């Protein structure tokens, strides 16, 4: 680890513990628990969770030795590579800075008969700061901001509160120009279905973005999201791995969510269920965050978003088409296809042709058929074994168990039994005899008398 990276690590540690020492013990313990319960973004873009013991250890080290005590220990091992060979590697690098470590190793092997490994040379160059190409100057990163509303939405996911035994996941899209939260939704799974729910809500309420800027999380690299953007005419942009630049706005928004909404949610004892959590979050976003002046723009997000007038909303038909899923299949000689265990019959003209099957992931009985982008009618279901796409799972319950129906069968039968016992028993009704039969019996008795 070079000196710059060690200092970045120390700054990250300092940012977590700098305010803990001034707190009273009880407040400090509560703050440490809150820090240990959530994720933190490192200077190099990774999300990590820091334990309470580690936070206490960093705090004590900073109190005793200041900022320098937070620096990671430099590993100074005894090199088994001869110093002369390493000096030769440095000389070769400085002689031709464009030489890579592998080429330096080959030159040394030819001249000396043997050479250290490429990784050894790379680590040594990194330690001396020789691993940067001279024609690749450090990139100066300015503050980027979209020029107008709906030019770019930045999307990401955040781990939220616990609901039963499950963790709620917040999917959110933020307008880069105004900092308005365009589409958002808590769910109990981190998948493309929950992402699409948040995006669909944003499209219907805030209009159509020109581009989506997301990371490489599995929901954001799915083929379903790619098709959705293609239908909407929206560019899907992925950040480069290891380069989180451009995502600071939504990370800052998540910090605001953690520091304000989540604090108040814990103070009220949490949310009863997912619906209540989404209602509370929507109320906070629309009535607090959107109406407060943003520190960077100097205007409230909703005011800046509507400065150019209300957005143009996409049609319901376009939104419905965008969130359909599709699969490619080749029809058999009998013009049939199979899809996740289901068998469908197509137009006979499509026999042996490759077709596109378009469908709602929650309804596999109704499948549209397209050939080379043109609609070719509806597939006729012949055998339906699965009604829902394997990856289109409904929202799981918070505790992982199905919600109770509220029906107490034993109490029902006990109540009915008690009602029967309280009724007056008519033995003549039970024997099948009616009033007419009783009167007839009396007449026979009189005749016999």
Image: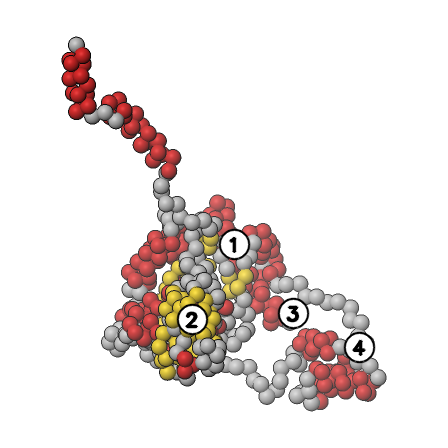
Label 2 or label 1, whichever comes before in sequence order? 1
Mark 3–mark 1 distance (CA, rounded to whole Å): 25 Å
Which residue corresponds to mark 4? Answer: 83
First along the sequence among labels 4 and 2: 4
N-term mark: 3 or 1: 3
Badge 2 local density, few (<14 within 10 Å), some, or many (20+)? some
Q: Is residue 163 left or right of residue 54?
A: left
Image location (x, y in percent) of residue 407: 36, 41
Q: Residue at x 29, y 28 (%)?
A: 420
Left or right: residue 121 compared with residue 307: right
Instruction: Determine whether the residue tagged by mark 1 lies in a helix, strand or loop.
Output: helix
Q: CA distance from mark 4 to mark 2?
A: 72 Å
Q: Say which label, 2 or 3, has the lower sequence index.
A: 3
Residue 52 percent across, percent down from the top left: 55, 52
Residue 10 to residue 436: above or below: below
Figure check: 279 above or below 327: above
Q: 147 or 295, which lies in front? A: 147
Q: Are marks 2 and 1 in contact (CB under 8 Å)?
A: no
Residue at the extreme bottom of the image, as rendered: 96
Q: Nearer the viewer, residue 82 or 426?
A: 426
């Amino acid at each position: 680890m070079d000196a710059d990276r060690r200092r970045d690590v120390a700054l990250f540690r300092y940012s977590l513990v700098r305010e803990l020492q001034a707190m009273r013990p009880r407040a400090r313990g509560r703050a440490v628990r809150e820090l240990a319960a959530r994720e933190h973004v490192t200077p190099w873009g990774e999300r990590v969770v820091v334990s309470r013991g580690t936070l206490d250890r960093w705090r004590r080290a900073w109190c005793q030795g200041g900022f320098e005590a937070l620096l990671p220990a430099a590993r100074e091992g005894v090199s088994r590579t001869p110093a002369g060979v390493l000096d030769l590697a440095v000389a070769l690098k400085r002689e031709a800075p464009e030489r890579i470590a592998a080429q330096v190793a080959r030159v040394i092997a030819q001249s000396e008969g043997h050479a250290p490994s490429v990784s050894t040379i790379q680590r040594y160059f990194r330690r001396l700061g020789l691993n940067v190409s001279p024609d690749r100057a450090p990139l100066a990163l300015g503050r980027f901001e979209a020029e107008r509303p709906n030019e770019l939405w930045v999307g990401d996911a955040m781990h939220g509160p616990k609901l039963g035994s499950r963790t709620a996941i917040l999917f959110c899209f933020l307008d880069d120009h105004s900092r308005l939260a365009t589409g958002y939704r808590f769910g109990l799974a981190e998948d493309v279905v929950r992402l699409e729910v948040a995006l669909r809500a944003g499209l219907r309420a805030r209009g159509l973005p020109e581009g989506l800027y997301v990371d490489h999380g599995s929901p954001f690299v799915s083929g379903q999201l790619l098709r959705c953007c293609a239908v909407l005419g929206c560019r899907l942009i992925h950040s480069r791995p290891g380069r989180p630049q451009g995502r600071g706005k939504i990370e800052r928004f998540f910090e605001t969510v953690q520091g304000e909404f989540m604090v108040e949610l814990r103070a009220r004892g949490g949310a009863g269920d997912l619906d209540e959590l989404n209602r509370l979050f929507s109320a906070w976003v629309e009535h607090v965050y959107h109406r407060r002046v943003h520190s960077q723009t100097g205007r409230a997000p909703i005011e800046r978003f509507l400065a150019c007038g209300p957005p143009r909303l996409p049609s319901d038909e376009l939104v419905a088409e965008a969130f359909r899923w599709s699969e490619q299949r080749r029809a058999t000689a009998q013009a049939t296809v199979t899809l996740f265990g289901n068998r469908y019959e197509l137009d006979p003209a499509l026999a042996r042709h490759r077709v596109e099957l378009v469908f709602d992931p929650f309804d596999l009985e109704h499948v549209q058929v397209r050939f080379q982008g043109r609609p070719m009618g509806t597939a006729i279901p012949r055998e339906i074994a699965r009604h829902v796409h394997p990856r289109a799972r409904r929202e799981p319950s918070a505790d992982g168990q199905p919600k109770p129906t509220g029906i107490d069968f034993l109490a029902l039968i006990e109540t009915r039994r008690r009602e029967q016992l309280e009724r007056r028993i008519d033995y003549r009704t039970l024997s099948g005899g009616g009033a007419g039969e009783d009167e007839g019996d009396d007449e026979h008795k009189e005749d016999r008398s």
